Every structure is written in structure tokens, then in C-alpha cells.
Image: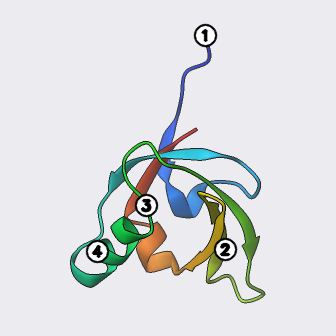
Amino acid sequence: KKTKRQIPLSKLPINTCGSIVLLGVLGTVKRLLLDLGMIRGTSLTPIFIAPFGEPTAFSVRGSTIALRKEETDCIWVEY
């Protein structure tokens, strides 16, 4: 059985599906992410990085959302 690794979302390779294990952001940003359905266990995939390195676009529950590195550094995923 393959062991799953836990890493910050910002380190998840492009086109690699990960599952949220920790949503470590606070305040308004956390509320927004929860409203978008980003809870523990949600699968998401980075699909595009902007030319200067951020934001990164993610496929989440059939939608595409863009997040800054300061946010993705605080969201932990396993893959």
C-alpha cells in the first residue's frame, strides 16, 4: 500500500490530485474557502500557475479558483 505524503498545497505538483487535511487560514479567507466547499477531505488539483508564480489556479468540485501563495502555504494536503 502506498503511503500518502502531507505537504502544503503550494508544493503540490501541477495536475496532481490532493486531498485537504488542514485548512490553516483564518478570518475572511477561511470563510470564503469554506463557502466554496474546501473542507477536510475535499479533492483539488493545481492546473495552472500564473507567469510570475502566483496565483495558482485549482480545480475544486468542478470549479476553477485562484489562490495566492500566502493562502496555499497554510492549506495542507495529502496525495
Q: Earlier in the sequence, mark 1 or mark 2?
A: 1
The quadrant holding residue 74 is: bottom left
The residue under label 3 is 37
> Which of the pair 35/58 is nearer the observer?
35
Judge from the rendering whether residue 28 lies leftward or rightward of residue 64; answer left or right: left
Please state the horizontal and vertical placement of residue 21, each as a whole percent of the image.
Answer: 38, 44
Please state the horizontal and vertical placement of residue 18, each as a whole percent of the image.
Answer: 58, 46
What amino acid is labelled 2 in the image? Ala
Label 4 vs label 1, nearer the camera: 4
The residue under label 2 is 57
Label 1 vs label 2, nearer the camera: 2
The quadrant holding residue 45 is: bottom right
Secondary element under disc 3, as helix, strand or loop, is loop
Label 2 vs label 4, nearer the camera: 4
Above or below residue 37? Residue 27 is below
- As measured in the structure, the alpha-carbon distance from the residue carrying label 1 to the one carrying label 2 is 30 Å
Task: Say which residue appears at 23% left-offset and 74% top-offset.
Answer: 26
> Could you classify mark 1 by the number of other residues whose Cα lies within 10 Å: few (under 14), some (14-19), or many (20 or more)?
few
The residue under label 4 is 31
> Could you classify mark 4 by the number of other residues whose Cα lies within 10 Å: few (under 14), some (14-19), or many (20 or more)?
few
Secondary element under disc 2, as helix, strand or loop, is strand
Q: Earlier in the sequence, mark 2 or mark 3?
A: 3
